[in-house]
Image (cartoon, rainbow, N blue to C red):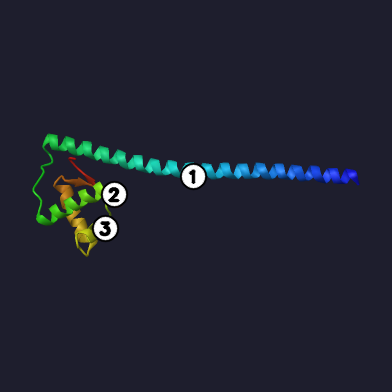
Amino acid sequence: MQDVIKELADTKQQLESFKDKYYCLLNANEERKQDNYRLKRENSYLRTKNYELTMLINTFLNIKKGSVKVQKLTETQEQIYLSIKEYITKNKISPSVRELCEINNLSAPATMKYHLKNLKNKGYITYRDKTPRSIVILGE
């Protein structure tokens, strides 16, 4: 009887040891998941910054060559340009097309895209087509 009780106590101790190891592994796995998520966010941020820098360099080189002429803006384009600058300064991220529509009291995203295309063609901003929040102010 004493042997059985001792064997049960040993088994219980082994189970506790396995349980502790299991929870340590679980915590380590959760930490790895969080690190992986953080690294993905940082990678995305760095890719965006790399794109912005590339666009700024290309635009600077084009302006220096004279292939891009900075033109005057219409009143609406000026308002949109200033709202983009203000939004980026305040939020540290570029606005979405819908947010720009709300800020500038426009109802159709297509109209905003038209104005953004004109701002891009005039050399004030750049952005990636079909990529959200990719507007970059040039010459800043």
**The residue tagged with tag 2: helix, strand or loop?**
helix
Q: Position of residue 11 (x, y in %)?
A: 79, 44
To which residue does mark 2 refer? 91
Indicate which label's residue lies in the foreground, 2 or 1. Answer: 2
Q: Nearer the viewer, residue 94 or 112?
A: 94
Q: Position of residue 65 (x, y in %)?
A: 13, 34
The residue positioned 9% from the left and 54% from the top of the image is: 74
Callouts 2 and 1 close, C-beta under 8 Å: no
Task: Please determine whether, in this image, residue 42 is positioned above or below residue 80.
Answer: above
Q: Amino acid at mark 3?
A: Glu
Q: In the orientation shown, which residue stands out farthest toward the right?
A: 1
Q: Earlier in the sequence, mark 3 or mark 2?
A: 2
Q: Residues within 10 Å of mark 1 (few under 14, many from 20)?
A: few
Q: In the orientation shown, which residue stands out farthest toward the bottom?
A: 107
Q: Amino acid at mark 2?
A: Asn
Task: Please determine whether, in this image, residue 62 is positioned above or below residue 4.
Answer: above
Callouts 1 and 3 close, C-beta under 8 Å: no
The residue positioned 63% from the left and 45% from the top of the image is: 23
The residue positioned 10% from the left and 51% from the top of the image is: 73
Q: Amino acid at mark 1?
A: Gln
Q: Position of residue 53 (x, y in %)?
A: 26, 38
Distance between the alpha carbons at the discs numbered 1 and 3: 30 Å
Q: Quadrant of residue 13?
A: top right
Distance between the alpha carbons at the discs numbered 2 and 1: 25 Å
Q: Nearer the viewer, residue 120 or 10?
A: 10
To which residue does mark 3 refer? 99
Q: Position of residue 25 (x, y in %)?
A: 61, 42
To which residue does mark 1 refer? 34
Q: Quadrant of residue 61?
A: top left
**The residue tagged with tag 3: helix, strand or loop?**
helix
Q: Residues within 10 Å of mark 3 (few under 14, many from 20)?
A: some
Q: Nearer the viewer, residue 3 or 131?
A: 3
